[in-house]
Image: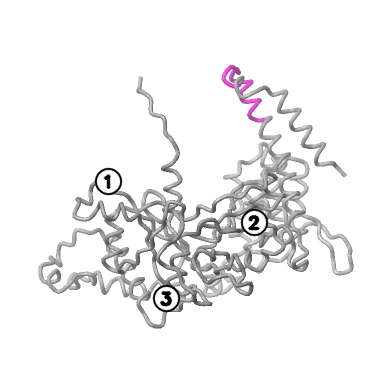
Amino acid sequence: MRNPATELDAIVEELGRLGGVDEVSGLADEALLQTTGALERLCRRLSALQVAVAAEVDHRSRHELGTEGLAATKGCRSSTELLERVTLASSETVSKRLKVGRNTRTRCSLLGERLPAQFAHVAEALAAEDLGLDSACTIIRGLSSIAPVVDAASLQTAEFELVAAATGTAPESPFPCTADDTKIQTEVWKVRLDQDGRLPVEERALRMRSFNLGRERDGLVPVHGALIPDVAAKFTALVNAYMSPRTAPAFLNEEERAAHDLERDPRTRDQQRHDIFAGIVDTAARSAETPSLGGAAPVVMVSVRQSDLDASEGADLEGNHGVGHIDGLESPVSMRVVKLYTCNGGIQRVVFDDAGRIIELGSPERCFTPQQRKAIALRDGECSVPGCHIPAAWSEIHHVDPAENGGPTHTDNGLLLCWFHHRTLDKSGWQFRMIDGAPWVKAPPWLDTSQKWRPTTRSRTRQLDAVDTIPILVGDRQ
């Protein structure tokens, strides 16, 4: 068995022979391309080790081990969270390694017999450093999606041919395919193996339905998905009713309806559909049948500094008078948006002192009141364990000084923890304390050897305050 440490030493040694970063600009064209290829081969070797390590961490954190699993003993809810913390890689990167690792790892039967990997050809090509991580993940994801409706022999044939094409060992592929070409070929194999008729159309549609919100970019949140036909028909009928030339937009009041030119709506058709969807969401949120969230009705919370709110009073909103933050969005919003929310939903003032302590909202009750929960949510923003992004609405409030020991039910003694971290706090190694009414955290030794107490600056408003304290040096432009 190869020693991973030895493999890593060999990689470092080979990187040293390739030269430093400063030498790249001096390479001739041919040497530059040779170096690029050599680095990619090293990356494939490293990727194979990363996949194997991720699969082993996942195996030692498997569900049946319960609280004795590796991830659980380190205070993490899953192998994905543990790997993210150790590697600092994105969830997408970690998920890709785990996807490939789980399907290329040898298995054991109920009798203890060793079985080949689910995708043995991919595993062999990865071990031989002939197949990259992107191509391997493409093949596994593509064939896994049709595995429930395709026989095992056909899947193995498709896997063999795709690996051969990706590595350049197929007779018709004298050169290895790129990851994008492998994706195209995988889609072709999916169509060939899962032809129309293998599953009823309705069942396939039900299996592939989806609705997702992407990451905010340039002030917009992209929407992706696929609706089953009858749902699309209902939405289309509703949209057509609102987009009829004789129907004024639902958000207009009576005076605006009378003055609105129904035949010349300045909005595009796509903009109208967006506004109709917004009206549907608002209607659903106001419905009495809407379920509660975090023990209360769904509420969009906007945080803004009092000084910014005061400065914007009576001012031109096109000017720069500070920003606010909507819970769940990464980018700040203008005071125009803040004023819309304060006008429509009202204001609850939560005052912080310079240390970040919440004042004016203390309560002696045993259970945290809805007002206290909202205040703590504004202060903490999300689960107080660094790196855990479970939102405040899904989190629970933890008494830092236990209530059974006389700890008060007060904002100075409560912080947000998600369900998992709340229940594993006693063994995960995370420690919390309150200093002047603001929460501080100390990470477990395996994650932070310095063992320092650090403030948990989680809310967007407090993060902005922290950034404002960083000095910025401005020099003359040449």
**First of labels 1, 2 by sequence position:** 2
- Is residue 156 visible in the rendered structure shown here? no
Q: Is residue 60 left or right of residue 375?
A: right
- The 10 Å Cα crowd at callout 1, few under 14, some 14 to 19, many 20 or more, is few
Residue corresponding to mark 1: 320
- Is residue 128 visible in the rendered structure shown here? yes
Residue 215 spot, x, y in % from top left: 46, 54
Residue corresponding to mark 2: 81
**First of labels 3, 1 by sequence position:** 3
Label 2 near label 1: C-beta < 8 Å? no
Residue 152 spot, x, y in % from top left: 74, 64
Q: Is residue 138 above or below residue 295?
A: above
| Magenta portion: prevailing SS class | helix
Q: CA distance from mark 3 to mark 2?
A: 30 Å
**First of labels 3, 2 by sequence position:** 2
Number of marks in the rendered image: 3
Q: Is residue 409 left or right of residue 198?
A: left
Residue corresponding to mark 3: 297
Label 2 near label 3: C-beta < 8 Å? no
Q: Is residue 158 above or below residue 6?
A: below
Q: Amino acid at mark 2?
A: Glu
